[in-house]
């Protein structure tokens, strides 16, 4: 069991990430994770030894690459404890997965006046696709308010549910606050109100920071994105209940998603192929598979425990610095720390941290409504990954002291 951030255990894993050289303090994993050698090698190896387009060729390279590609679908299903690999749709990222649900499921099954419930802390990726539907068919968006501690106002949530509610969409772990939302409770509340309400969980952060069990969670759609999962960019995952996917029309049309095409009529394949038009991100899927193998080898519980240790260690140190306000101070929290200083603007501080080799994110974190809720234009966000360690926290604290001397 992993206990100490400074243990050999973690040093061992940090060495798997070639980019994390001495003096690099990467604290922006919530934005995108760095890649272990295993992922880089798996992608290079595919391209050097057997790369070919999939699902089409009768020759060895194509067949082997098809098998490897489809094996990753099963790996993702097992990683998320999804009932079937046929419910795993590969998309470009979380953003595309949510747009797929909005445009395919939403445009088919929602009508003017139908209501969906989101939270005030959603990433723009789980807001804007639904706003497009407001313009296209006149649905109504309601939002669960965020309380001062960065937790959800679940009493108000109860009052938002109505006979018009068709979907509840919630971020599992807030990328801007680190708050771990009670997704299971939120889903159960929706289903108790009306079992027909569809629930969508944005797992972009939760799939990375700890174990996810879709069957326990009980949602209808779940989305996540490969580049935060220590895999490559350009690959994301939509999981959907098979009966829902089966009832949904294609999101895009093209090769590989059809059964037969004539100019009179085209018929489509069953899910998941129906939703994977065109040549997919083959090399990236292989990279995602390697990332999942890598994470499974370490254990998601271990990663969660490690990040929790780092969070506690960092909060103790940061609380010693004058003039910082923290956002997202609830009990249930992942390794993401958001704060602002009363002595300088977040972006000025982030620029000084950069000079110290400390890479944090500053700004609205694609959560502008959340920033408006707190009456701020942005925060500094330090986020941990499995490779983060006490040295990173020390460098952050020293960098903040330096910034304080220069800017205060
Ligand atoms: C909670 C959350 N949702 C959605 C996204 C969007 O992910 P992507 O840009 O990979 O589509 C992110 C990425 O920052 C996120 O943190």
Image: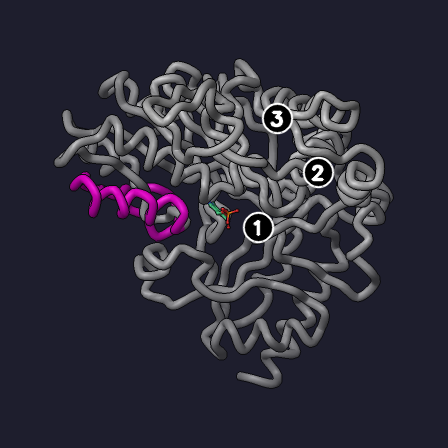
| Residue 302 seen in render | no
| Circle nearer the viewer, 2 or 3 | 2
| Circle nearer the viewer, 2 or 1 | 2
The disc label shown at residue 76, or none: 3
The disc label shown at residue 30, or none: 1
Q: CA distance from mark 2 to mark 3?
A: 12 Å
| Residue 65 seen in render | yes
View extreme (front): residue: 263
- Quarter of the image for the N terminus: give it: top right
Q: Is residue 125 magenta?
A: yes
Instruction: Indicate the secondary structure of the residue bearing disc 1.
Output: loop
Left/right placement of residue 226 relative to residue 238 reads right
Left/right placement of residue 386 relative to residue 344 reads right
Residue 274, placed above or below residue 130: above
Residue 191: percent from left, percent from top: 29, 19
| Quarter where residue 156 is shown | top left
Q: Is mark 1 within 8 Å of ligand 1?
A: yes
At a point 47% along the width and 76% down the height, the residue shown is 345
Residue 145: percent from left, percent from top: 28, 46
Instruction: Indicate the secondary structure of the residue bearing disc 3.
Output: helix
* 361 and 304: which is toward the camera: 361
| Quarter where residue 20 is shown | bottom right
Residue at the spot of label 2: 287
Q: CA distance from mark 2 to mark 1?
A: 19 Å
The magenta-colored residue range is 124-152
Residue 320: percent from left, percent from top: 59, 65
Left/right placement of residue 258 relative to residue 369 reads right
Instruction: Indicate the secondary structure of the residue bearing disc 2.
Output: helix
């Amino acid at each position: 069991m992993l206990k100490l951030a400074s243990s050999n255990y973690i040093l061992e894993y940090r060495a798997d990430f070639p980019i994390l050289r001495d003096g690099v303090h990467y604290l922006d994993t919530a934005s995108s994770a760095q890649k272990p050698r295993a992922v880089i090698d798996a992608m290079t190896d595919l391209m050097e030894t057997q790369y070919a387009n999939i699902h089409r060729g009768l020759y060895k390279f194509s067949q082997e690459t098809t098998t490897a590609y489809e094996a990753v679908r099963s790996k993702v299903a097992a990683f998320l404890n999804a009932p079937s690999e046929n419910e795993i749709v590969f998309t470009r990222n979380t953003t595309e997965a949510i747009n797929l649900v909005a445009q395919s499921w939403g445009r088919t099954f929602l009508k003017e006046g139908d209501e969906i419930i989101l939270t005030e802390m959603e990433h723009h990726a789980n807001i804007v696709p639904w706003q497009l539907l407001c313009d296209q068919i006149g649905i109504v968006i309601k939002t669960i308010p965020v309380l001062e501690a960065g937790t959800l106002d679940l009493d108000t949530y109860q009052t938002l549910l109505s006979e018009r509610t068709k979907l509840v969409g919630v971020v599992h772990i807030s990328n801007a606050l680190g708050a771990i939302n009670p997704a299971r409770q939120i889903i159960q509340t929706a289903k108790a109100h009306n079992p027909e309400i569809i629930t969508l969980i944005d797992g972009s952060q939760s799939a990375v920071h700890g174990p996810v069990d879709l069957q326990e969670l009980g949602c209808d759609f779940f989305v996540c994105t490969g580049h935060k999962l220590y895999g490559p960019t350009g690959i994301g995952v939509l999981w959907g209940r098979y009966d829902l996917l089966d009832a949904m029309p294609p999101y895009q049309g093209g090769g590989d998603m059809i059964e037969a095409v004539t100019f009179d009529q085209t018929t489509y394949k069953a899910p998941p192929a129906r939703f994977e038009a065109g040549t997919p991100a083959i090399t990236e899927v292989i990279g995602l598979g390697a990332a999942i193998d890598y994470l499974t080898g370490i254990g998601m519980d271990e990663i969660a425990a490690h990040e929790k240790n780092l969070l506690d260690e960092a909060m103790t140190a940061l609380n010693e610095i004058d003039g910082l306000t923290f956002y997202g101070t609830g009990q249930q929290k992942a390794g993401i720390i958001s704060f602002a200083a009363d002595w300088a603007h977040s972006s000025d501080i982030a620029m000084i941290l950069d000079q110290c080799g400390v890479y944090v994110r500053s700004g609205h974190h694609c959560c502008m409504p959340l920033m408006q809720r707190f009456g701020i234009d942005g925060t500094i966000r330090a986020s941990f990954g499995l490779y983060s360690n006490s040295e990173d926290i020390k460098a952050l604290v020293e960098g903040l002291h330096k910034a304080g001397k220069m800017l205060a």
